[in-house]
Amino acid sequence: MKISIRRSGGFAGISEEITSLDTGKLNQAAAQGVENLVRELDLFNLPTNPPGQKVGADFLKYEITVSDRGKQHTIIFNDDDAPPTARLRDFVQRLTQFR
């Protein structure tokens, strides 16, 4: 499974990849942990743009792309502290620990 997380926007208009990982290159325990997180969030079935986000030009925007066994899905959300995206923000935080 491959996962890429990009961050863009904000006051400075940044655009950067904050993490990119391939679970095939992690130790077995770490790979299982990451894959379990993806399954728990049901990332492949979440909408590309989750509902309930606040609107604002200065929010940081995150783009999570997950590829596994020929499937690929991207989710884009604002870092706006909205409850509907809390689990996605937690996912980003946990995956950035693998940098």
Image (spheres, rainbow, N blue to C red):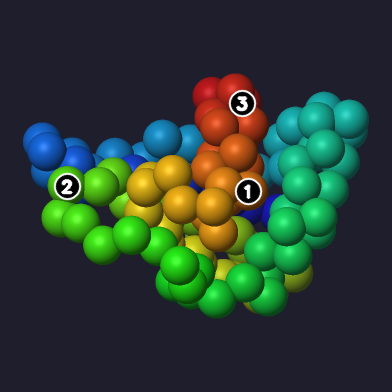
Q: Alpha-carbon neighbours of circle 1 within 10 Å: few (<14), some, or many (≥20)?
A: few
Q: Quadrant of residue 28?
A: top right
Q: Is residue 21 visible?
A: no
Between label 3 and label 1, give the one nearer the viewer.
1
On the rendered structure, is 28 left or right of 37? right
Q: Which residue of the protein is positioned furthest toward the left in this rendering? A: 12
Q: Residue at x 53, y 43 (%)?
A: 89
On the rendered structure, is 74 left or right of 35? left
Q: Nearer the viewer, residue 84 or 96?
A: 84
Give the mark nearest the N terminus, 3 or 2: 2
Distance between the alpha carbons at the discs numbered 3 and 2: 27 Å
Q: Secondary structure at mark 1?
A: helix
The residue wearing badge 1 is 87
Q: Quadrant of residue 40?
A: bottom right
Q: Residue at x 41, y 35 (%)?
A: 18
Q: Residue at x 36, y 54 (%)?
A: 78
The residue wearing badge 2 is 58
Depicted 45 relative to depicted 68: above or below: below
**Amino acid under label 1?**
Arg
**Amino acid under label 2?**
Asp
Q: Secondary structure at mark 2?
A: loop
Give the mark nearest the N terminus, 3 or 1: 1
The residue wearing badge 3 is 98
Do residues under tags 1 and 2 come within 8 Å of each other at their CB atoms? no
Between label 3 and label 2, give the one nearer the viewer.
2
Where does the image place residue 97, in percent across and percent down from the top left?
60, 23
Q: Nearer the viewer, residue 73 or 87?
A: 87
Q: Alpha-carbon neighbours of circle 3 within 10 Å: few (<14), some, or many (≥20)?
A: few
Looking at the rendering, in which quadrant would you find the C terminus? Answer: top right
**Amino acid under label 3?**
Phe
Where does the image place residue 21, in percent across and percent down from the top left?
59, 40
